Amino acid sequence: MTQWANTAVLLMAYGTPARREDVEAYYTHIRHGRPPSQAELEDLLSRYDAIGGLSPLWQITQRQAAVLQAELNRRHGVDAVKVYLGMKHAHPFIADAIEEILADGRQRVVGLVLAPHYSAMSVGTYLDEAKRALADRRPFFPVESWATHPGLITLLAERIQEIRRQFSDAEQQDLPIIFTAHSLPQRILALKDPYPDELKRTGDRVAEVLGTTHYTFSWQSAGRTREPWMGPDILEKLTQMAADGFRQAIICPAGFVADHLEVLYDLDIQAQQHARQLGMHIERTRSLNDDPALGRILADVVEGALQHD
Ligand SMILES: CC1=C(CCC(=O)O)c2cc3nc(cc4[nH]c(cc5[nH]c(cc1n2)c(C)c5CCC(=O)O)c(CCC(=O)O)c4C)C(CCC(=O)O)=C3C
Ligand SMILES: [Fe+2]
């Protein structure tokens, strides 16, 4: 029998700078302590400017914690399972959240990342940081992946159905779906990292629910580093599709659960502009953000992690 009382959910997300003055420190943290060049910093600042100055990610992350908390309260009573936010690259950091959890006297910790697809380089590093900070002081129940949770599949399928209506009847006759996630350095492939397959499993299941075979995959938002990153990048993908005669497509950024720079800039500004130049009509699916359905999915995932306690 699972004991719910005194459980903590360490809900982890990327984090974003709270103020413009914090962008440099944030970027330095992402780069493992190496400060960016002036040009790199200005490039990042100009992308934030293009989406209105800063990212809404932190506000959305807080609302996502709230919908999960509401669902856990409904299922297990108020305060039995309490959600704590820990960011990878901004305040409150993962280690800060762990200290708060211990100070509150919580007896077990579920580690859950707001990204559905496991990679040792993404979700794996959040879980490693949580484990390091917890240092065996409480039992830890990590969630590695929720890529094929049935609720996630249904929700993404609904988001795709919803965006179809933005296209004319004629366009809907030939409307491929492009599932995207954040690119990672190519070296993860040599390590047999599950990440590409994780995204594929999500896309395959969503397409199956929609009853379509008209879909493909692409990576986006590759980092500005010297090493090669996984492709095809979404911009190359659109170029290729235009060359193959496609005039429209739906982009479903299945690797992300919130509106942030990668969605609002890389897709809504950069990819849109590229598509216009190619004469293509593209639309992206609405982010999950604080949809109560996301709260139910995350609550299921938390319960699944504790099943064997
Ligand atoms: C896998 C992955 C996810 C998805 C899973 C998850 O969510 O964890 C993700 C999400 C995000 N990445 C974000 C921001 C950035 N990521 C960067 C750079 C990098 N990302 C990487 C990986 C990922 N990142 C990597 C390996 C680097 C290179 C690091 C290096 O140099 O060694 C840079 C540096 C500049 C640039 O390259 O653009 C920025 C500004 C924001 C917040 C944006 C906002 O504020 O709204 C979000 C949600
Ligand atoms: Fe990133």
Image: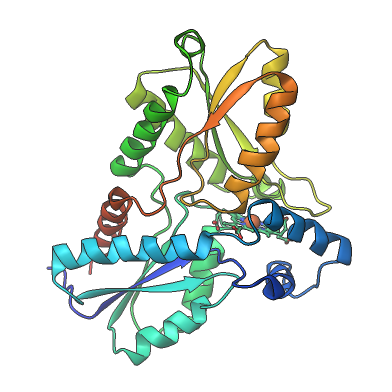
- On the question of residue 232 being in view, the answer is no
On screen, 20 above or below 215? Answer: below
Give the residue at the far front of this rendering: 52
> Which image quarter: residue 120?
bottom right
Closest to the observer, 22 or 192: 22
Q: Give the residue drawn at x 63%, y 14%.
A: 246
Q: Is residue 194 above or below residue 75?
A: above
Across the whole image, how many numbered discs are drawn on residues? 0
Q: Quadrant of residue 109?
A: bottom left
The residue drawn where x is 48% and y is 14% is 168
Q: Where is residue 63 in the image (x, y as percent from the top left)?
A: 38, 62
Between 168 and 132, the one lying in front of the other is 168
Please tell me in which quarter of the rendered image ligand 2 is found. bottom right
What x and y, as percent, mark residue 89? Answer: 60, 70
Q: Indicate left or right for 206 with 258 as reference.
A: left
Could you tell me which quadrant the N terminus lies in?
bottom left
Compared with 191, 240 (above or below) is above
* Residue 10 sits in quarter: bottom left
User: In the orientation shown, which residue stands out farthest toward the bottom?
Assistant: 103
Q: Where does residue 259 sit, x and y in percent of width and height?
A: 51, 51
Q: Which residue is drawn at 57% across and 58% down?
A: 122
Is residue 269 visible in this depiction of the protein?
yes
Percent position (x, y) of residue 30?
Answer: 68, 67
Image quarter where the C terminus lies is bottom left
Instruction: Residue at 28%, 48% (x, y): give it.
Output: 293
